[in-house]
Amino acid sequence: MIKIQPATTKADFECISKLAHVIWHEHYPSIISLEQIAYMLEKFNSVAAIDKQTKEGSLFFYMTYNEVPVGYTAIKKQADFLFLEKLYILEGYRGKKIATAVIQFMEAFANYLGISKIKLNVNKFNVNSILAYKKMGFVETKSMVTDIGNGFVMDDYEMEKVF
């Protein structure tokens, strides 16, 4: 059974940060360098970074599958859309409809806020994730390169889903 639970405590943030380290080292070495992985984990997925992002309006959630923490997500309300900042699932739990449950949860949350659009950014070389998002109704809207500091960039597609 899939559950999506709000992350609000330091213990929740620690759980997410630990998940991030495992997931990123499972998934990203074929896409970005180990140096960029380490940088991005510290800058965006450390306990301090998660705490800072929540104070800036991001909402974090972690997903469990049969009571086992298996992934995390974060969203932030923008003027006319919900921005899906993060969606990461442990490799052994992909293909179990967890991402689909998260997107359905996000759509319901967006509807509650009176919003009918979700946007996200995904690395251009993250082919499996791009295919999964397309299967869930997202379309590519633009290509973008974002400087994230320390000599690193994020080379992404923006994708959106209108419902």
Image (spheres, helix red, strand yellow):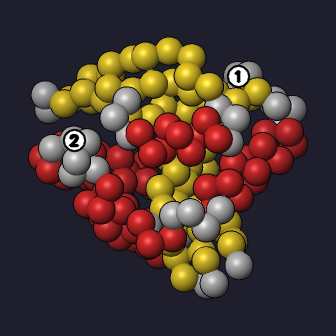
Name the amino acid type tagged 1. Ala
Is label 2 in a helix, a strand or a loop? loop
The residue that appears at 48% across and 31% down in the rendered structure is: 121
Report the residue marked by disc 2.
32
Residue plotted at (56% across, 63% down): 95
Say which residue appears at 51% left-offset and 24% top-offset. 158
What residue type is disc 2 on? Ile
Residue at far bottom of view: 67
Residue 85 seen:
no
Q: Is residue 95 visible?
A: yes
> How many numbered circles are shown?
2
Q: Nearer the viewer, residue 153 or 58?
A: 153
Q: For the residue labelled by badge 1, is the local secondary structure a helix, a strand or a loop? A: loop
Tell me the crowding category of disc 1: few under 14, some 14 to 19, or many 20 or more residues within 10 angstroms, Cα based.
few
Q: Is 125 on the left or on the right of 119, as rendered?
A: left
**Label disc, if present, on residue 79 of the rendered structure:** 1
Nearer-N-terminus badge (2/1): 2
Q: Quadrant of residue 33?
A: top left
To which quarter of the image does residue 107 belong? top right
Q: Quadrant of the C terminus?
A: top right
User: Residue 49 in the image: x percent, y percent?
Assistant: 37, 51
Q: Are marks 2 and 1 in contact (CB under 8 Å)?
A: no
Relative to 65, residue 115 above or below: above
> What is the x, y in percent for residue 162?
76, 27
| Quadrant of the image occupied by residue 1 | bottom right
Q: In this image, 111 relative to 117: left or right? A: right
Q: Position of residue 151 (x, y in %)?
A: 13, 28
* Vertical placement of residue 157 versus 135, above or below: above
Residue at 70% across / 35% down in the picture? 137
